Structures are given as structure tokens and as C-alpha cells.
Amino acid sequence: MEDLNIRKAGRAGRITFTRPKALNALSHEMALAIHRALDGWRDDPDVALVIIDAEGDRAFCAGGDIAAVYRAGLAGEHATGQRFFADEYRMNAAIADYPKPIVAFMQGFVMGGGVGVGGHASHRIVGDTTQIAMPESGIGLIPDVGGTWLLSRAPGRIGEYLALTGARMGAGDAIHAGFADTYLPEAEWPDLITRLEDTGDVSLIEGGDAPTAPLRTMDLSPFAQETLADIIDALEEDGNAQTLKILQANSPLSMAAGLAMVRAARGDGRMQDSLAREYRFTYRATQDTDFLEGVRAQIIDKDRKPKWMADASPDNVAALLAPLGPNELTWSEPA
């Protein structure tokens, strides 16, 4: 397809994002195509491993292409978003559970939907331009695509901090937080890809010393507080104006729900449990949350002035995360 180059090269199945002008944003069709390719190579004896990379210097994948979801939701047609999120999450789970190695080369922006592709690979390579983030609270959503699973497994209170602020991680922080495995200067990536294609041998992946990880030494103790209001109070007491400014700009509902979901995910036994919980929120997102307003302000009109109106009370968070009955996320194969 036009936005992906899917092929076999030597011992490797290759998936390359090919829409660099759109920062390789992930569309519904792309999510389905990735899942189909993985299924096609699962039992292919010629494919020893899968390599996922992207064209362009600016982004591996800067997020989901949600303009169609926004337009449909604005028209009261909520099934478009529901189908997109369900199929995207099934693809994320397929990457996480794949029986063969998947090697992701993640340069530039790796955000939201990009984390859902690269962040669940078995071998996650980052370089000097890498900027990884889950910035959904700024568009009225929650860290999804298995993001709550990854965040819940970050050391200390890094998960809460990243979920609420959407802060970006360079290579060192990404490795420390569990979003990446190996640092390798990007000039060395083409040679490694060629050798992986030739041999199918992931033992060839040898990284260098990762850059410093500022998250290691940050005082994130305020994010151990029980509620969002308590976290804000603790930040005010510490005089942390920079972080407070970020939280004041984000959706209160998204932050309250994201906080609850990261903490709930710590008890999950597999990523599918976290994805199913995320789907309960995103299934309802175009109808019952700040999502449409957030997308309007940040992506469509770009006025950066969202008017957050959704109820951020604990009762409403619980309602948005309540089971969906017959609409719960299932793990069927892609169409």
C-alpha cells in the first residue's frame, strides 16, 4: 500500500512506514496491513525475523491518523473510531505476542500509535534523534495502544509522570523507562539492517552506551499521591511551576483516567488486559469525553486552546472504564 512498504528481504519480513511528510502517522488501513503482514509471516519458514522502520528523519511514527475519527465523531458516527481503535489494539497485541523476533528502528518522534508499533517489539532500537512520548492527555484521550501497560512497568512513579504530562523521552530515558532496549547511533542502522536481512540473527544487535537518563534523578514523589488533586497540591508545595503548567493545560478527565489506568495496569497479567481497559475509554471517547475538543484544538484548528468540559470525577472515570458487555475488545484476526 502507498503508506507502507511491506516486502521480504533475505531472511527478514520488512515493514517500512513511507509517509514521512505526515510524520508516518498510522491510519486504520495501515494498522490492518501491518497485522495481515505479521500473520502472513508467522509460519513462513523463509522469515526468521521482522524489521519495522520508517522513511524520513523526523519521525518513526508520530501517532495515529485520527482526523477521520474526529470527523465521524463530530457527525455523531462513533463506530468509525471504535473500529479503528479495536483493530489498532489487536495489531499492537500481535506485535507483543509475535513468535519471531521483531526489530524496530525508532528515530525522531515516536508517539501514541508509534509506541503501539515500536514499543511492543522484542528488540527496540533508538538513536540520538529519538523522542518517545504518550501525549494523549493533551488531546483529551488516555495513553492507549498498550501504553498503560508500558507505563505501569516503568520504575518508580515514572509511569504516572509520563501519563499525566506527556513528557518526551530521549534514548537514555526511553531505555530506563522500559520503552526501548538498545541505543545505536542512527548512522549505523542501515548496516545492521542489511546484516539482519542476510542472517536473520538478532544476536548481531549490539548497542553502545546509552545517553544519560534525566528521569533517573528526577524527584517524582508528588506523583505517588492518591488523586490528581493531591498530585497538583504536592507539586504546588514543591514549587514545581513547569510541571504544573503542563498539567493545567491538559484534560482533567484524561489525566484522572490515565492515572487510574496506569495503576490498574500494574496488576494486569498480560498486555491484552491493559488494552481491553484502554478500549473501554476509547470506545466511548468520541461521545463522552474531551477527545473531540482536544483534537479540534491541537490538530484541526491548532489554536492550542481546548475548552475542557468533561466530568473528571471518580464516578465518571469509573463509568468510562466500566465493562462494555458485548462490545468488549476481543482478539479475532484482522479482516
Image: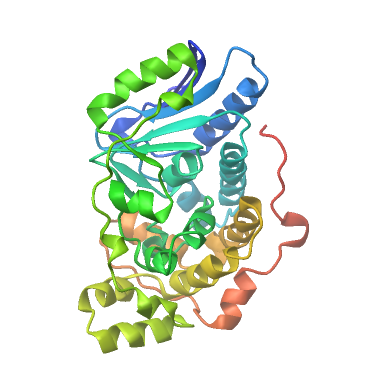
- The quarter of the picture where the C terminus appears is top right
Relative vertical location of residue 333 with respect to residue 44 in this rendering, above or below: below
Q: Nearer the viewer, residue 254 or 11?
A: 11
The colour scheme of the drawn protein is: rainbow
Residue placed farthest to the right in the image?
Answer: 326
Left or right of residue 203, residue 183 in this image: left
Residue at x-position 27% and y-position 55%: 213
Q: Which x, y percent locates residue 225?
A: 44, 82
Query: Would residue 327 appear left or right of 8 to someone viewing this image?
Result: right
- Above or below 14: residue 155: below
User: Residue 271 in the image: x percent, y percent?
Assistant: 61, 52
Instruction: Name the residue nearer the viewer: 72 or 136.
Output: 136
User: What residue appears at the point 31 percent right and 44 percent down from the top-left corner?
Assistant: 109
Q: Horizontal and vertical percent for residue 63? A: 40, 46
Disc tally is: 0
Residue 135 horizontal side relative to residue 262, left or right: left
Location of residue 278 with respect to 203 vertically, above or below: below
User: On screen, 130 above or below 261?
Assistant: above
Answer yes or no: is residue 65 visible: no
Image point (36%, 72%), residue name: 307
Given residues 282 and 113, the one toward you in this image is: 113
Counting from the top left corner in percent of width and height, residue 144 is at 51, 55
Q: Can residue 72 be seen?
A: yes
Taking the spot 23% from the left edge, 79% from the top edge, the residue there is: 240
